[in-house]
Image: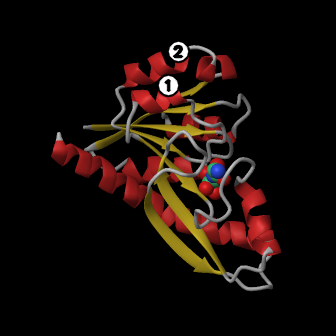
Amino acid sequence: MKRIVILASGSGSNAENIITHFSSNPEVEIVAVLTNRKDAKVLERCARLEVPALYFNKKAFSGSDVLLRLLKGLTPDLIVLAGFLWKIPSHLIQAFPNKIINIHPALLPKYGGKGMYGDHVHRAVKDNSESETGITIHYVNKNYDEGAIIHQAKTSITPNDTVGNIAQKVHQLEYEHFPKVIEKIVLEHGKES
Ligand code: GAR
């Protein structure tokens, strides 16, 4: 059984999509969803989906080893950032080498870095009159949005697309690709060990 932990900060529609995707797969378990926001909608989703969910604060995350110990105890094969907005501290990256992945709502290296999340990304894409955007799934390293790229997918956009339309198109790509890429990674890791 492969064990996945999801970190999410907000709505959690990707978290829900991943949970639903793996609910019928006996080889993969979503063991927990962890969030840094007490009011994150992802907590409601987890309650409904009957997946354990926990809130942690900044001190537990980066000011102590509380989250590190919690994560180690969960023995994850993969830690998935699904709309998680804090930078991962280096002690967590070192503890889980090549085991933390992130999804970014643009075609990195464009539109990455600090402050580039959610609609801020889509607004920048629109302001630059891009004709396409997309998603990037990548390993997490100590710099925002700079780890090795695992998978990208594109969608075209027109000048008529609003920020909302762009967000919708990108979310569709995320729902389609993210669970499949996660599945591939955890099952391939399984073959190595
Ligand atoms: C997703 O579009 C994800 O790519 C983005 O936040 C959204 C979360 O949506 N992540 C980032 O911007 C990270 N820099 P969700 O909470 O509905 O899954």
Give residue 109's position: percent from left, percent from top: 59, 62
Question: Could you tell whether 28 is left or right of 134 in the image?
Answer: left
- Residue 164 against residue 34 in the figure, above or below: below
Nearer to us of marks 2 and 1 is: 1
| Residue 52 visible in the shown view | no
Could you tell me which residue is drawn at 71 percent across and 28 percent down? 38
| Residue 128 visible in the shown view | yes
Could you tell me which residue is drawn at 70 percent across and 66 percent down? 167
Which residue type does callout 1 highlight?
His
Give residue 59's position: percent from left, percent from top: 66, 17
Query: Tag on residue 65?
Result: 2
- Residue 130 against residue 177 in the figure, above or below: below
Give the residue at mark 1: 91
Q: Choose between 47 and 17: the one closer to the eye.
A: 17
Could you tell me which residue is drawn at 50 percent across and 42 percent down? 141
Query: Tag on residue 106?
Result: none
Question: Could you tell whether 191 is left or right of 99 in the image?
Answer: left
